[in-house]
Image (cartoon, coloured by chain):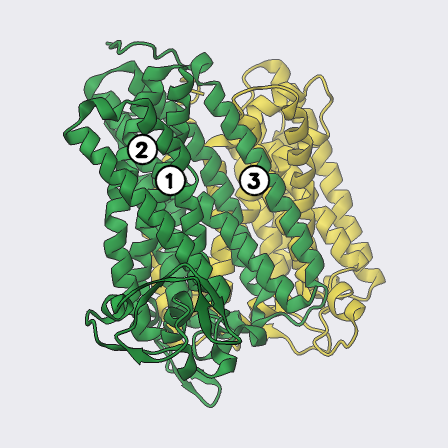
């Protein structure tokens, strides 16, 4: 049963990055869009993410619940030592979630919009940035359970060039997902060109940020290259991601929106796979090598069984409903709703 | 500020904030669906307008509640890691099911908000009902988890170790039913009275009266029925607390000395030093009766509980008095309203009736917060009753005071923005919806 739980955990993380990531990306590219194009971009984004955005928090909640029920030691270690970046991420989540609703549901459209929009945009950057920092800090052996002073226990646990660069990389991935996603929403030639241009530029930025991650890892002595190239599945995943990125680049102006979305999703899946595979079942690498493992640090048998069944039963309800939700709003696009 | 106090205050503040939003998010969909049902059946445009106006309220409150709930799932670990390390695997079952219920609620809300004119009208209506039902279910599940902290079950605590974990037994602990019932009814009372009060005020202002009358009636009926049911649920809760948590009951009633035939104390100022209550009204033998059903039964006082295991008496006592007092006031108004509906038709729309409802607008939520204070502060000094102390669960990280200031600032600004948003939704009604007559469409 523990493997069922782990598969759910991994899938929930992936879906949060994919769907939540595209959602964050929408705010990020708003920041990098010229003033003239901004309203058009925003409208398209709202139409694209509106119906499913309410569901995106849920992936994160599922991840958290799986961790604290099934792997409490892992959840509490992260909560204690990564307290500060977690709080920063939460601030981003609060600001973003509320600003999004406020700007779309305020009955009066006036200067308050000038308050909501920057909050939404800035928090769209902050949230994935700290998410990346947290993920990087978890696997880079920075957390020191023996630390005696405040700085080494609660600051150096996450503040490093490697963590910062992964944070940046996560932000660019989100922007990339959003730009690819929105291409399919373009209704006219002009929009299509605007979105394609954005996507192409973002690809270069993602690659540059990825390069930075390797540089930072190298300078801080984190054996990132070893992790990825030490086993065959990791290498294959990375090669597949690279090939599909090239295909994406070629297909960008060929009007194949669904194919592009699938490719982008595939790349992110491969990156997450490569990043997690080499450590499995370890999930938190601690300073001194005493790692936290999904297998050794799992809860009691009865807990894991209950959790596994709860997740299985839950997905029987959730998956068809979610698929139908996305399907209906893809099909009936153009029919005007009440908003 | 010391870290332990800061952590407790931050948790109290976060929960106190979340509870308002989640209760509205849980109950408003039922009001919305009732208006929607009336629209589909009677085809009067005013009901459609009410439905749409309320659906915007639901969206705002759902999103805010979802965000504050996400934050809470992190805060449990950020502030109380030692508690979560042991409690997570035991009381996690309701949380994992709640995830599902909440997810379905979000999906259904997506269908509902964006589904106008896209689906069959009754399917569209039905997705709204699903929003309400799954919201209520998640509320019940979360309260079941809290009930476990009051009534730990589903494990054996041997030499500081948590053994033989049974998540199902933990979920269906002794307190889950009485607490969940009390909370759900409270959500209906507080949301009903708050919504009814706002619309009553708009009727008194004479703007778009037809729209607000319809809205007022739906909310008032839900709220008043719930207000009449709440004393029954309160009685179940009182008997349950008396049995399981005598210290909490003793603090609620500022009952210092173990006796037989104990009077019920109303109001008064408890003094823990002298163990007396000044200026209180006493109803002879009533506490014994309420706690056990027998006028002469013995009720355990605080003298039977070691000093270090006693909750703070004054806070719990005052909070309990506020909750019961406001509950009684709303019950009174509910009875008057029913008389108006059934016997004295001319009372129902009268100015004084509306004014009473305007006065009652915040009462439900004040009572709700007071009740939450009773159950949480009344459990102290324990985080898991009788098993783990709150002080032993707090995070080792220093400087929590800064985190508390930050969260407080954020929650206060959110509360201000949400109030502004609602104010605007309400004042825009006469511009957005023309519901001056009972015109029918189609």
Residue at horizontal 33 percent and vertical 44 percent from the top: B329
Q: Whole-Å distance between the Cαs marked 3 and 2? A: 22 Å
Q: Chain B's shade in the image? A: green
What's the chain of the residue with tag 2?
B
Query: Which of the marked residues, 2 or 1, is nearer the chain's N terminus?
Result: 1
Decide if residue B322 is on the left or right side of residue A280: left
Instruction: Please state the horizontal and vertical placement of residue B365, each as a whole percent of the image.
Output: 43, 45
Q: Chain A's shade in the image? A: yellow
Q: Is residue B226 visible?
A: yes
Seen from this angle, which residue lies furthest right? A219
| Residue at mark 1 shares a chain with residue at mark 3 | yes
Instruction: Please state the horizontal and vertical placement of residue A31, each as a whole percent of the image.
Output: 71, 31
Q: Quadrant of residue A327?
A: top left
From the image, tell me which residue sits under label 1.
B191
Secondary structure of residue under mark 3: helix
From the image, tell me which residue sits under label 3.
B415
Question: Looking at the figure, which quarter contains the C terminus of chain A?
Answer: top left
Q: What number is the disc on residue B219?
A: 2
Q: Is residue A229 above or below residue A210?
A: below
Instruction: Please state the horizontal and vertical placement of residue B308, each as a whole percent of the image.
Output: 52, 81
Q: Nearer the viewer, residue B46 or B138?
A: B46
Q: Is residue B268 above or below residue A89?
A: below
């Amino acid at each position: 049963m523990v493997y069922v739980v782990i598969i759910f955990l991994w899938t929930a993380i992936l879906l949060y990055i994919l769907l939540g990531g595209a959602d964050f990306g929408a705010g990020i590219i708003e920041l990098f869009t010229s003033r003239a194009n901004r309203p058009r971009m925003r409208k398209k984004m709202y139409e694209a993410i509106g119906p499913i955005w309410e569901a995106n928090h849920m992936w994160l909640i599922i991840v958290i619940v799986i961790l604290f029920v099934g792997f409490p030691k892992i959840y509490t270690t992260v909560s204690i030592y990564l307290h500060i970046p977690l709080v920063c991420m939460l601030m981003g989540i609060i600001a973003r979630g509320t600003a999004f609703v406020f700007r779309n549901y305020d009955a009066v459209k006036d200067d308050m919009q000038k308050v909501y929009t920057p909050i939404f945009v800035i928090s769209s950057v902050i949230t994935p940035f700290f998410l990346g920092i947290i993920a990087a800090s978890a696997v880079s052996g920075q957390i020191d359970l023996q630390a005696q002073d405040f700085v080494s226990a609660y600051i150096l646990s996450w503040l490093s060039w490697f963590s910062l660069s992964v944070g940046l990389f996560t932000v660019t991935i989100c922007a990339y997902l959003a730009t690819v996603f929105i291409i399919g929403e373009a209704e006219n030639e002009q929009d299509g060109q605007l979105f394609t241009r954005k996507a192409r530029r973002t690809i270069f930025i993602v690659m540059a940020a990825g390069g930075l991650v390797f540089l930072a890892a190298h300078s801080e002595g984190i054996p990132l290259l070893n992790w990825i190239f030490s086993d065959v599945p990791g290498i294959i995943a990375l090669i597949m991601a690279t090939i599909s990125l090239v295909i994406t680049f070629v297909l960008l102006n060929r009007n194949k929106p669904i194919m592009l979305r699938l490719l982008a999703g595939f790349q992110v899946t491969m990156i997450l796979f490569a990043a997690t595979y080499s450590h499995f079942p370890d999930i938190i690498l601690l300073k001194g090598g005493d790692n936290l493992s999904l297998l050794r640090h799992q809860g009691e048998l009865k807990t894991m069984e209950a959790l596994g069944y709860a997740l299985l039963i839950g997905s029987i309800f959730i998956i068809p409903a979610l698929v139908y939700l996305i399907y209906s709003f893809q099909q009936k696009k153009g029919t005007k709703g009440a908003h | 500020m010391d870290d332990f106090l800061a952590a407790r205050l931050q948790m109290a503040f976060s929960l106190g904030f979340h509870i308002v939003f989640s209760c509205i998010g849980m109950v408003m969909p039922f009001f919305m669906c009732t208006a929607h049902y009336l629209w589909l059946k009677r085809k009067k445009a005013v009901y459609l307008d009410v439905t749409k106006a309320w659906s915007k309220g639901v969206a705002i409150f759902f999103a805010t509640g979802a965000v504050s709930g996400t934050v809470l799932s992190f805060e449990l670990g950020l502030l109380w890691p030692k508690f979560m390390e042991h409690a997570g695997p035991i009381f996690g079952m309701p949380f994992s099911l709640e995830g599902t219920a909440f997810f379905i609620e979000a999906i259904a809300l997506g269908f509902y908000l964006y589904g106008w004119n896209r689906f069959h009208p009754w399917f569209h209506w039905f997705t709204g009902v699903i929003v309400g039902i799954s919201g209520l279910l998640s509320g019940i599940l979360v309260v079941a988890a809290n009930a476990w902290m009051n009534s730990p079950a589903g494990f054996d605590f041997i030499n500081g170790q948590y053994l033989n974990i049974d998540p199902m037994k933990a979920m269906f602990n002794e307190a889950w039913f009485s607490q969940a019932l009390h909370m759900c009814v409270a959500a209906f009372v507080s949301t009903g009275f708050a919504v009814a009060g706002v619309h009553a005020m708009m009727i008194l202002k004479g703007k778009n009266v037809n729209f607000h009358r319809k809205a007022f009636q739906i909310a008032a009926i839900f709220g008043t029925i719930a207000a009449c049911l709440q004393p029954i649920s309160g009685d179940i809760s009182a008997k349950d607390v008396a049995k399981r948590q005598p210290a909490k009951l003793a603090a609620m009633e500022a009952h210092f000395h173990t006796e037989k035939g104990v009077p019920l104390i109303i109001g008064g100022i408890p003094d823990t030093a002298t163990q007396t209550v000044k200026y209180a009204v006493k109803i002879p033998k009533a506490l014994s009766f309420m706690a056990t059903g027998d006028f002469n039964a013995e009720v355990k006082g605080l003298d039977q509980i070691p000093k270090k295991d006693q909750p703070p008496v004054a806070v719990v006592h005052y909070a309990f008095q506020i909750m019961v007092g406001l509950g009684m006031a709303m019950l009174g108004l509910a009875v008057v309203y029913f008389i108006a509906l059934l016997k004295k038709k001319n009372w129902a729309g009268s100015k004084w009736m509306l004014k009473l409802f305007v006065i009652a607008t915040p009462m439900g939520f004040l009572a709700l917060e007071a009740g939450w204070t009773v159950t949480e502060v009344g459990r102290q000094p324990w985080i898991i009753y009788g098993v783990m102390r709150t002080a032993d669960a707090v995070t080792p990280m220093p400087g929590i005071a800064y985190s508390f200031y930050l969260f407080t600032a954020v929650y206060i600004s959110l509360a201000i923005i949400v109030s502004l948003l609602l104010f605007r939704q309400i004042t825009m009604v006469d511009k957005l919806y023309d519901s001056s007559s009972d015109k029918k469409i189609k």
